[in-house]
Image (tube, coloured by chain):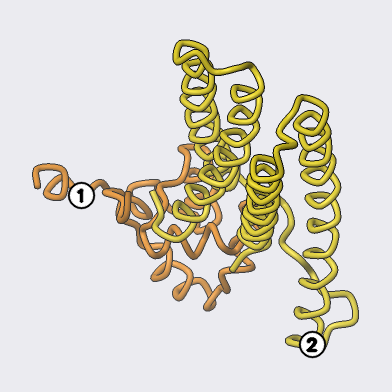
Chain colours: A yellow, B orange
């Protein structure tokens, strides 16, 4: 597994955990009758901050762990990690981003559709961030799939 | 998805060039070893620029490194 693949796998796990946390909190709010704008927007903030910080932390951790594993495997003092992105990595990343945007667009449309069904704006905002995280997860899966299957 | 229609002789050419390693070739053409592996397994078709760089490393014309599988196209 290349460094890029490891990074994507870490991102996939991170966003799946964030999605799990988000859904759990939303269901807790609905059950506890505390599903109001203050709590929902607070959750928005938490999810965005978590996504940024965990992604940065996970990337650094992946780099360190890769270096340690490589050093154990090869016995080198300064192990070389292939963290450069070449043309194949860039194409896969672009295709993954395209998938992410596609899913996010469909998600935005579906979220807006809740207005047609007479739902309050809070439902739309809740769905919007849900589809945002789902889009990132699907984008990561598509990237991993292309690394494994080829194109 | 899957196997590309572009065939190549990279593995054979590496062997005949003093058993050049995938890492050595990757360093010379400026890509990662994973990309060389993907190309050898015909899971990735390189850009024209990368194809020319590979041919230049082996000092052979492009057609000796890469070929297009017409039969696969008709399937």
Q: Which residue is mark 1?
A: B69
- A113 sits left or right of A8 in the view: left
- Using the rendered view, name the quadrant where residue B16 is placed: bottom left
For image coordinates 76% across by 66% down, the residue present is: A81
**Quadrant in which the N terminus of chain A is drawn:** bottom right
The residue positioned farthest toward the right in the image shown: A77
* Relative image position of residue B7 (x, y in whole percent): 30, 55
- A11 sits left or right of B59 in the view: right
User: In front here: A55 or B29?
Assistant: A55
* Relative image position of residue B56 (x, y in whole percent): 53, 50
Q: Secondary structure at mark 2?
A: helix
Q: Which residue is mark 2?
A: A72
Q: Is residue B50 above or below residue A68?
A: above
For label 2, the crowd category at 10 Å Cα-Cα, with few meaning under 14, some 14 to 19 and many 20 or more, is: few
For image coordinates 45% across by 54% down, the residue present is: A145
Residue A124 at least partly seen: yes
Q: Mark 2 or mark 1, which is nearer to you? A: 2
Mark 2 and mark 1 on one chain:
no
For image coordinates 51% across by 71% down, the residue present is: B17
- A66 sits left or right of B60 in the view: right
Chain bearing tag 2 is A
User: In front here: A113 or A73?
Assistant: A113
CB contact under 8 Å: marks 2 and 1: no
Q: Secondary structure at mark 1?
A: loop
Q: CA distance from mark 2 to mark 1?
A: 42 Å
Residue B27 at least partly seen: no
* Relative image position of residue A48 (x, y in whole percent): 79, 37
């Amino acid at each position: 597994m290349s460094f890029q693949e490891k990074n994507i796998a870490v991102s996939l796990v991170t966003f799946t955990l964030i999605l799990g946390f988000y859904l759990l909190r939303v269901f807790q709010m609905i059950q506890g009758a505390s599903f109001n704008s203050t709590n929902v927007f607070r959750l928005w903030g938490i999810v965005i901050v978590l996504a940024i910080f965990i992604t940065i932390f996970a990337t650094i951790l992946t780099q360190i762990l890769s270096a340690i594993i490589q050093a154990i495997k090869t016995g080198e003092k300064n192990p070389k990690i292939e963290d450069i992105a070449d043309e194949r990595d860039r194409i896969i990343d672009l295709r993954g981003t395209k998938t992410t945007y596609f899913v996010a667009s469909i998600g935005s449309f579906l979220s807006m559709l809740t207005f047609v069904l007479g739902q309050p704006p809070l439902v739309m905002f809740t769905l919007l961030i849900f589809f945002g995280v789902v889009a990132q997860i699907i984008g990561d899966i598509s990237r991993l799939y292309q690394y494994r299957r080829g194109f | 998805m899957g196997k590309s229609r572009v065939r190549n002789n990279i593995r054979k050419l590496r062997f005949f060039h003093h058993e050049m390693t995938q890492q050595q070739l990757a360093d010379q053409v400026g890509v990662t070893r994973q990309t060389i592996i993907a190309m050898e397994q015909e899971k990735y078709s390189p850009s024209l620029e990368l194809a020319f760089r590979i041919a230049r490393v082996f000092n052979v014309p492009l057609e000796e490194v890469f070929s297009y599988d017409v039969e696969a196209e008709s399937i």
